[in-house]
Image: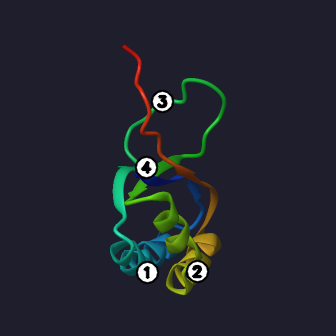
Amino acid sequence: MAKGYWIAHVDVRDPEAYQLYLKANAAPFAKFGARFLVRGGTGVVAAGAARARSVVIEFPDYATALACHDSEVYREAAKLRDAASVVDLVIVEGYDGPQPG
């Protein structure tokens, strides 16, 4: 079964308030088996435009990725996120098919 992913691009407007979101998202992420693959870090915009932070979070499957986002406990955390930042978030199903080569 293909994994599920959150791909987020974030501009933090209020770093102190954003820390509250980071603390609040820990419980739902643990509950739904989230694993950070990218969390900020050094990067280059190779084409187009991007926000200051990129985040990729892996979930056991697509349904779990959606369930985490739609959970009441995450929705409460998201209120803190939205008050402190501007976010573009996409939830996608991973790919398990053939690879090049």
Residue position for label 4: 2
Residue position for label 3: 44
Give the spatial CA distance, label 2 vs label 4. 25 Å
Could you tell me residue 8's position as x and y percent?
A: 55, 53
The residue depicted at 50 percent of the width and 85 percent of the height is: 73
Query: Which of disc 3 and disc 2 is earlier in sequence?
Result: 3
Q: Closer to the observer: label 4 or label 3?
A: 4
Q: What SS does tag 4 mark?
A: loop
Do the CB atoms of the residues marked 1 and 3 lie less than 8 Å apart?
no
| Amino acid bearing label 4 | Ala
Q: Which mark is residue 75?
A: 2
| Amino acid bearing label 2 | Arg
Q: Nearer the viewer, residue 36 or 21?
A: 36
The residue depicted at 57 percent of the width and 75 percent of the height is: 78
How many numbered callouts? 4
Q: Nearer the viewer, residue 39 or 20?
A: 39
Q: Is residue 69 visible?
A: yes
Could you tell me residue 68's position as x and y percent?
A: 49, 73
Residue position for label 1: 24
Query: Which of disc 1 and disc 4 is earlier in sequence?
Result: 4
| Amino acid bearing label 1 | Ala
Q: Nearer the viewer, residue 19 or 55?
A: 55
Q: Quadrant of residue 42?
A: top left
Q: Closer to the observer: label 2 or label 4?
A: 4
Give the spatial CA distance, label 2 vs label 3. 31 Å
Do the CB atoms of the residues marked 2 and 3 lie less than 8 Å apart?
no
| Amino acid bearing label 3 | Val
Q: Is residue 51 above or below residue 65?
A: above
Do the CB atoms of the residues marked 4 and 3 lie less than 8 Å apart?
no
In the image, 100: left or right of 50?
A: left
In the image, 40: left or right of 49?
A: left
In the image, 5: left or right of 31?
A: right
